[in-house]
């Protein structure tokens, strides 16, 4: 920072910094794209992994449900069991849990530029409070497409209905989608999934009562077909509406970018033509120069302000010292006057006492002389 402030940072250092920033950006983009691909492949790959353990009994043996030529836990199947277990543990469970742990770790900084650049693709399209919805969807798909294999056949639809109802409740509670059309499509898909599992329960009950000849199977089948067709039609129109809405939103931004990224180049034979400039060539030198002048003016203004404040502080310091000296001088003069007023009366009293003593002595000597003169006159009466 000191080198940058002093202007001693060379071109090589600036190029190295730009190269490092570009490498970081490419690396983070690659990681985010890789995570996005892994999330898209998580449900189908996890389903394949769980179906590796989907075995059905045939007599006294168990055969793989996807391929009845493979006997479970024997020969070929047994060789790939450790690999399948490792895949399910590391990819199906540990991978989304690690991402969830990272989101929880940075839960207070999920909308900062750094964390949003790394994990923003997971919650950029959701409202605040729905940052974990993508992880919710990963586990929902994994349960409904794979984990149900380990649930017994009779209890499997009930567990699926429970999961579907809980997802509908969580969807309406969190409301993560920013677009209300996407929200209603998601809710319709969750409800349709719930109805399908309810239909499975109805069909299972019908199979147990084969003696009752009704058209329950046909009714349930037609209902499922109607629901699927309705969902596909509604999804198509919803997708069309979302595209129109997205186009209307992006049209304004694209027009602004087009206006900001175009320049008029006069031609000899025509008044001029608009040539779209690329983002790299649309650098506005006039704005850059104006910004540089503004920065320079702000810097000079700040320096002048600092210098003026320094002068004001120096004047305040001098005035403070002057005031202190005046107060000290005034205190000294006042003390001297007080001392003078106390000493003078004492010295005057002593002088008065001395004067009185001297006067008394003089009167005594005068009286003594007069007494001697009278005595002399009494002793010589003839002379009188």
Image: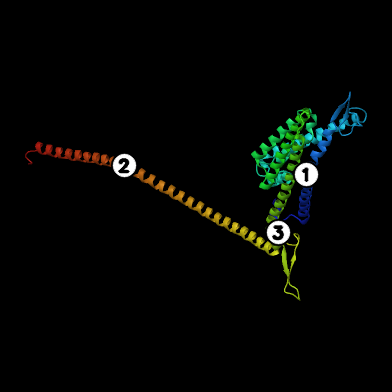
Q: Quadrant of residue 150?
A: top right
| Quadrant, the C terminus | top left
What residue does disc 3 label? 254
Element assignment for label 3: helix
Q: Quadrant of residue 216?
A: top right
Q: Quadrant of residue 359?
A: top left
Q: Which badge, 3 or 2, comes first in the chain's sequence?
A: 3
Q: Toward the viewer: 113 or 298?
A: 113
| Residue 353, image x, y percentages | 26, 39
Measured along the vertical axis of the image, is residue 353 above or below residue 55?
below
- Name the residue located 35 percent from the left edge and 44 percent from the top edge: 340
Using the numbered discs, state the Cα–Cα distance from disc 1 to disc 3 in whole angstroms.
Answer: 26 Å
Extreme residue toward the top, this view: 60
Q: Toward the viewer: 305 or 249?
A: 249
Q: Which badge, 1 or 3, comes first in the chain's sequence?
A: 1
Point out which mark residue 36 bears: 1
| Residue 225, image x, y percentages | 76, 41
| Residue 284, image x, y percentages | 70, 63
Using the numbered discs, state the Cα–Cα distance from disc 3 to disc 2 in whole angstroms.
Answer: 105 Å
Element assignment for label 2: helix
Q: Which badge, 2 or 1, comes first in the chain's sequence?
A: 1
Q: Toward the viewer: 47 or 307?
A: 47
Residue 43 visible in image:
yes
What residue does disc 2 label? 347
Extreme residue toward the right, this view: 75
């Amino acid at each position: 920072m000191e080198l940058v402030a002093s202007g001693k940072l060379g071109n090589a250092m600036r190029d190295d910094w730009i190269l490092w920033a570009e490498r970081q950006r490419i690396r983070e983009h690659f990681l985010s794209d890789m995570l996005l691909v892994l999330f898209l492949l998580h449900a189908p790959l996890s389903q394949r992994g769980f179906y590796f353990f989907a075995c059905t009994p045939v007599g006294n043996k168990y055969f793989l449900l996807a391929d009845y030529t493979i006997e479970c836990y024997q020969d070929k199947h047994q060789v790939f069991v450790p690999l399948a277990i490792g895949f399910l543990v590391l990819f199906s469970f540990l991978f989304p849990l690690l991402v969830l742990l990272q989101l929880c770790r940075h839960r207070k900084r999920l909308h900062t530029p750094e964390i949003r650049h790394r994990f923003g693709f997971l919650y950029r399209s959701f409202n605040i409070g729905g940052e974990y919805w993508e992880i919710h969807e990963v586990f929902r798909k994994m349960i409904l497409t794979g984990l149900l294999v380990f649930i017994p056949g009779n209890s499997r639809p009930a567990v699926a209905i429970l999961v579907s109802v809980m997802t509908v409740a969580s969807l309406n509670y969190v409301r993560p989608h920013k677009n209300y059309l996407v929200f209603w499509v998601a809710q319709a898909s969750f409800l349709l999934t719930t109805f399908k599992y309810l239909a499975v329960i109805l069909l299972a009950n019908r199979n147990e009562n084969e003696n009752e000849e009704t058209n329950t199977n046909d009714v349930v089948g037609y209902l499922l077909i109607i629901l699927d067709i309705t969902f596909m039609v509604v999804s198509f129109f919803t997708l069309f509406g979302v595209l129109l809405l997205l186009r209307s939103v992006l049209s304004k931004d694209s027009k602004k970018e087009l206006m900001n990224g175009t320049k008029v180049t006069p031609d000899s034979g025509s008044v001029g033509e608009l040539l779209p400039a690329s983002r790299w060539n649309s650098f506005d030198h006039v704005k850059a120069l104006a910004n540089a002048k503004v920065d320079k003016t702000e810097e000079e203004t700040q320096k002048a302000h600092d210098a003026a404040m320094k002068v004001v502080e120096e004047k305040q310091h001098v005035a403070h010292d002057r005031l202190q000296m005046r107060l000290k001088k005034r205190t000294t003069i006042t003390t001297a006057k007080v001392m003078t007023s106390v000493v003078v009366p004492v010295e005057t009293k002593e002088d008065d006492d001395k004067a009185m003593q001297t006067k008394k002595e003089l009167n005594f000597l005068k009286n003594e002389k007069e007494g001697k003169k009278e005595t002399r006159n009494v002793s010589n009466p003839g002379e009188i």
